[in-house]
Amino acid sequence: MNGETQRLLLLLKVRGQIFVNSLRRPNRRVELVVQGVGAISAGVFVLVLAAGVFAGTLTALRNSQPWVLGLLLWAIFLVWQFATLLIEGYSPGINFREIARYPVSFGGYYLLNCVYGLADPAAAAGALWLLCMWIAVLVQTPQWAPAAAGALIVFVVFNIFCNRLLAGLLERFQSTRQGRERLAVVLLLIMLAPQLIQFAGLNWRHSPGALPGRSALLRFAALNDLSPPGATLQAIVGSGNTRLFAVLLLLGFLTIAGLMLRIQSRTVYLGELRGDEQRARRDLRVSPGWKVPALDETISAMFEKEFRYLRQNTRLLVQIVYPMIIFALFFSGRSPIHRIFPSARGSSAGLLGMMAGFLVLSIANICYNNFGLDRDGFGRWMLAPVKMQKVLLAKNIAHAAPFLAMYTLICGLLLAVARVSPLQAATVTVSFLTVILVQVGAGNLFSVYWPKPIDLTRMGSRTVSAAAGYAALLVIAPVGIIGGLIAMAAIYLSLPWLPLVAATVIFCVVFRLYFVALDRAALYIDHHLEEIEQVLSK
Amino acid sequence: MAEPVIETKALRRTFGNFTAVDDLNLVVERRQFYGFLGPNGAGKSTTIKMLTGLLRSSSGSIRILGRDLETDRVEVKRRIGVVPEGLALFERLTGAQLLNFCGRMYGLDRTIAAQRTTELLEFMDLADSSEKLVADYSHGMKKKMALAAAVIHGPEILFLDEPFEGVDVIASTTLKRLLQRFISRGGTVFLTSHVLEVVERLCSHIGIIQNGRLVAAGSLDELRAGVRIAGHDHSPLTLEEIFLQVVGGARQSEEVLSWL
């Protein structure tokens, strides 16, 4: 076995070890089971799709519809490239840039880089699907099989080159803190996009002419033959000059991708260094901090700190802004809610209540883990001559502020342009404030019982601990039951004012309980200081 | 004898069956530069955490500036400055924002906090990086930031846990300059450090802790007078020699790492 092969095997072994080690943290049995089930499900999914690709290719060729192969090639190309982005973003893989530090020749490094690309799960799945496609071609139209074999092999290598180029870019992004954070936001948006498209898209299903970009898609289809999957298709099913042109085009794509990968690899191999950019020197002028009306100096300072943290946390901002996007869709009548609840179109109070519910659930992302973003900074609260009750209060005010602002905007808009009666608005508003208070009060306890450091650079890092997530059910369920019972009583007894009175009474009780919870959380911190600090510093 | 500004009596801290600090009786007077030394795991950080309210003691008492730490915690914290082991910085604030915030947490007026922030950033050579997130600072810059955050409110005592660890010569000089200035203005410094040369040069008084117990304390001359090394010539003992004599130096066999 020569040196390069040994290094390659070692690399694959290390990748496996890193994956195994990532499962070895304590209290991760549930996650381990979930990951195991996930891996098996993914394997089954890939095999089912392989059978689908085989059957699809066979049927398409039998019915003389070769363009279907083009769609399959596009799907495989996209999965191969973009699944890597998601998998690498989540999993603790090897930073390939590190390999260049070892005594490996550039040729060896380039080869390792390419072959390593085949060890990617998406690459393995893609190669399997292409093999199934080729077998179907062999079965249905054996005369195309040799050309198909050549074209598909070139397509595989092209995919590997593109995949490694993308991985290289990913590693380059991850080499700076800002890059890692931006990448986490991109991944979050990729995950949220299907939901938003679904929300916004149900109406388009009923009026397909309104689908934006439809004409662009048609124009794009006409250029498909010039794309790598299109050229691969023509290299398989085309004839004469068309096939020759497609083969040359495909080889051209391969050469360009190979050269680009070579340039990228060479840059890394020669020791390209990247870091967060330095700002040019300028005169130092520190402006005084914020003074928030109605808050004292210390709480204002803490409010400012918390708000700055929120503002920098783009991932959290996306989660905060998400309810507003949903509201915009609901308000414009583009949401499926009008079909699920036809009365919602006429009932703006229903929409207000629903948005209030959405907001009180969303605030959990922040207030169930108050110290998660502070991490090592948690100790700073302990050093300051301030009682912990005050710190928690300031955090609660800062965290609730954006949600209160959003609610005020929504409520104001609905009061101004829609039919919401003042009684309905008052009822929903008092209920909203009550539940917000419940959420932040319970959140203070969850934050100290189950603190969790938040790593903004890792997409997989949850914002609240799993235990707090489950405990939230104990808070949300009784709130829902009580609210439901009051609403039913109001309808049954024909007392429209009952919910407002009940909400006001409950608010007063919750207000008192909030301060009891605040004291309890502060006491818990005092007795478990070291423990909390250790968890947050991990 | 002047009134001690730091005084512990029979201080003890246990973690399960392990006793990290045992029967610790410390006395530090105003304007002393007190170096608290000990091998790894001796109980230095645990002690400093208890003295600054970052950790509760299991038993014993702590008086800082004449006040009982247990009952007067907030007032004590107002009058001390701390550079803790992990630095405890809010790393997602810029340097200027962090210092401003720390000043205001200690009750400084907004304008004064901003003014002192500017001065400290200039003094610490951090002015160019004042708008960078602390997360992007180097280790030495973070140490300087932590020290700036500890002094912004003008404390009477500074507690520093390993302030010179991982700091380059330039940053270390800046830190030393600030500490000497602090002492000359009537402040008291209590620091732990592994860098014995620095302690020897800066500290007026030294305490050595081993296995949670204070095994030696006094000025450098007093420690020299108390330690005798067989076969040593008449030149004054260095702090390293005293330290090794008190805690027992490690003896390495010639067999170990014979390949190196």
Image: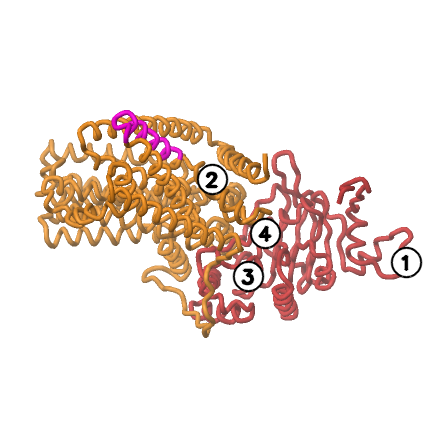
Chain colours: A orange, B red
SS at circle 2: helix
A246 vs A357, nearest the viewer: A246
Q: Chain of mark 2?
A: A
> Dot 2 corresponds to which residue?
A115
| Local SS, label 3 | helix
Q: Is B121 rendered above or below residue A70?
A: below
Disc 3 is attached to a residue of which chain?
A: B
Amino acid on which disc 1 is placed: Asp
Whether residue A510 is visible here, answered yes or no, is yes
Q: Which residue does the numbered mark 1 point to in the structure image? A: B233
Please check whether the numbered discs 3 and 1 fall on a single chain: yes
Q: Chain of mark 1?
A: B
Question: Which region of the structure is painted magenta?
Answer: A124-143
Q: Which mark is residue B141?
A: 3
Q: Position of residue B22 (x, y in %)?
A: 69, 42
Secondary structure beneath label 1: loop
Which quadrant holds the N terminus of chain A? Answer: top right
Crowding near the residue tagged with mark 2, few <14, some 14–19, many ≥20 C-alpha atoms within 10 Å: some
